[in-house]
């Protein structure tokens, strides 16, 4: 049993406001709350940069947790451990005494543990006649239980930030490769004066990024490289169109102009009055792309049988990797995901990716299942699926298995996000329960 009053450290150690705040927070733990100590320690290791604790201090904390009996930290069984410095040194692989005391002080200052010092500063426990611990003096692990959700959220946000940075670096690498290939093609096909300017632009952007470059630096470089890729594509398309027009004039003496030059595909689909029509359109798009025997030239050919002016069809985005649902539409159908965004709201796709990592951890969806979904569906669509699963979490017994099933269906081109969101919207409008 633990004392409920505030205690001060033994000897010349001074009491601080941080110690007082940690003791007050530790006193507010519900009696029935319990936390797996090793899962909690793993979250601490992942979020150590945010918490401000070193790996050596975490090694000492690991030794303290090993003295706690059982795998669940709970107030009912007591949260005070009382090992001697000699035993702690053995479980920290022979750490020196001065180093051990320094890292114990760091854990106390970080608010991860509390000191429960005895009158003489020794660590021990008084036991009852039945052998149970009545009162213990040593290190109190209550702050770990009180701040468990904070550590879990911090670890999830850091994992989402690392995943987003890796995604942006991958996109930058692909964009740089495209620019190099298109620049080589332009150099071979166009006069020298037309590609020298683009060559200078690429040389200015080809400065290698440092290994510790921030997400903002990667995003700025990626945006500039995307602009260069678009300019190169337009320049090559104009060159190709001019060559095709000359060839058509020589062969038939006339030129057939395409009366619908705009592509039917947008970077993000719009949203009309009814989400059902939008969902049906998305299904039709996926069915046309996945139809056996179809080709890009067949999809872009006019229905009247006339040949278009340009032999290059419009490039269709991979339906598995493009955003199928506009962000405002998704948030209106799946409002619960906004509670897990940064500062309790979602305004951008980056915020949605961060919230999806937090929800994925909360629903016990494995990182492998989520990474596989991101590889097949794309980051934004996978996050949208997580938002839909959260809305139906009370009816899905295994969210991880459900996500794997949807990923496998998407790999076979038999699943898309739009019909899933459309079903949720119709059920919400009609007041029907969300079926699993």
Image (cartoon, rainbow, N blue to C red):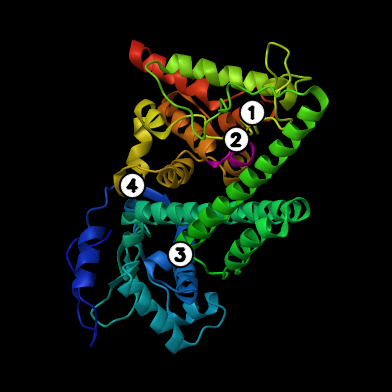
The reply to whether discs 2 and 3 touch (Cβ–Cβ < 8 Å) is no
First-in-chain label (2 vs 3): 3
Q: Marks 4 and 1, Cα distance to the nearest angstrom?
A: 40 Å
The reply to whether discs 3 and 4 touch (Cβ–Cβ < 8 Å) is no
Q: Nearer the viewer, mark 2 or mark 3?
A: 2
First-in-chain label (3 vs 4): 4
**Residue 101's spot in the image, x, y percent?**
40, 83
Which residue position is annotated with label 4? 33
The reply to whether discs 1 and 2 touch (Cβ–Cβ < 8 Å) is yes
**Residue 330's spot in the image, x, y percent?**
41, 30
Residue nearest the observer in this picture, 425 or 132: 425
Quadrant of residue 415 in the image?
top right
Q: Marks 2 and 3, Cα distance to the nearest angstrom?
A: 41 Å
Which residue position is annotated with label 1? 410
Disc tally is 4
Magenta residues, start to end: 373-379
The disc label shown at residue 181, or none = none
Which residue position is annotated with label 3? 65
First-in-chain label (4 vs 1): 4
């Amino acid at each position: 049993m633990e004392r409920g009053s505030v205690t001060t450290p033994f000897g010349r150690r001074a009491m601080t406001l941080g110690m007082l705040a940690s003791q007050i927070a530790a006193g507010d733990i519900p009696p029935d709350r319990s936390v797996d100590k090793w899962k909690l320690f793993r979250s601490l290791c992942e979020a150590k940069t945010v918490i401000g604790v070193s790996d050596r201090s975490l090694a000492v904390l690991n030794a303290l947790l090993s003295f706690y009996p059982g795998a669940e930290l709970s107030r009912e069984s007591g949260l005070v451990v009382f090992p001697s410095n000699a035993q702690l040194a053995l479980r920290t692989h022979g750490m020196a005494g001065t180093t051990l005391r320094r890292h114990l002080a760091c854990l106390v200052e970080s608010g991860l543990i509390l000191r429960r010092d005895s009158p003489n500063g020794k660590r021990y426990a008084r036991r009852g006649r039945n052998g149970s611990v009545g009162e213990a003096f040593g290190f109190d692990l209550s702050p770990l239980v009180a701040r468990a959700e904070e550590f879990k959220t911090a670890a999830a946000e850091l994992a989402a930030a690392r995943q987003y940075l890796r995604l942006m670096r991958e996109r930058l690498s692909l964009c740089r490769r495209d620019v190099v290939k298109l620049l080589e093609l332009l150099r071979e096909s166009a006069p020298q004066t037309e590609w020298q300017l683009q060559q200078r632009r690429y040389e200015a952007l080809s400065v290698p990024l440092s290994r510790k470059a921030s997400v903002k630096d990667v995003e700025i470089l990626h945006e500039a490289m995307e602009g260069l890729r678009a300019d190169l594509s337009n320049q090559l398309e104009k060159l190709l169109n001019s060559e095709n027009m000359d060839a058509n004039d020589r062969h038939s003496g006339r030129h057939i102009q395409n009366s619908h030059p705009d592509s039917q595909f947008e970077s993000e689909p719009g949203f009309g009055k009814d989400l059902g029509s939008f969902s049906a359109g998305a299904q039709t798009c996926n069915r046309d792309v996945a139809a056996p025997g179809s080709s890009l030239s067949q999809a872009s050919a006019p229905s009247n049988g006339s040949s278009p002016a340009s032999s290059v069809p419009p490039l269709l985005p991979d339906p598995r990797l493009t955003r199928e649902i506009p962000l405002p539409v998704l948030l209106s159908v799946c409002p619960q995901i906004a509670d897990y965004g940064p500062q309790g709201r979602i305004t951008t796709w980056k915020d949605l990716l961060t919230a999806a990592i937090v929800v994925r951890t909360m629903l016990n969806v494995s990182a492998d299942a989520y990474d596989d979904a991101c590889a097949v569906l794309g980051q934004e669509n996978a996050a949208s699926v997580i938002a839909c699963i959260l809305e139906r979490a009370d009816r899905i017994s295994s969210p991880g298995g459900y996500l794997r099933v949807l990923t496998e269906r998407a790999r076979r081109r038999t699943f898309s996000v739009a019909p899933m969101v459309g079903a949720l919207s119709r059920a919400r409008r009609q007041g029907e329960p969300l079926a699993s």
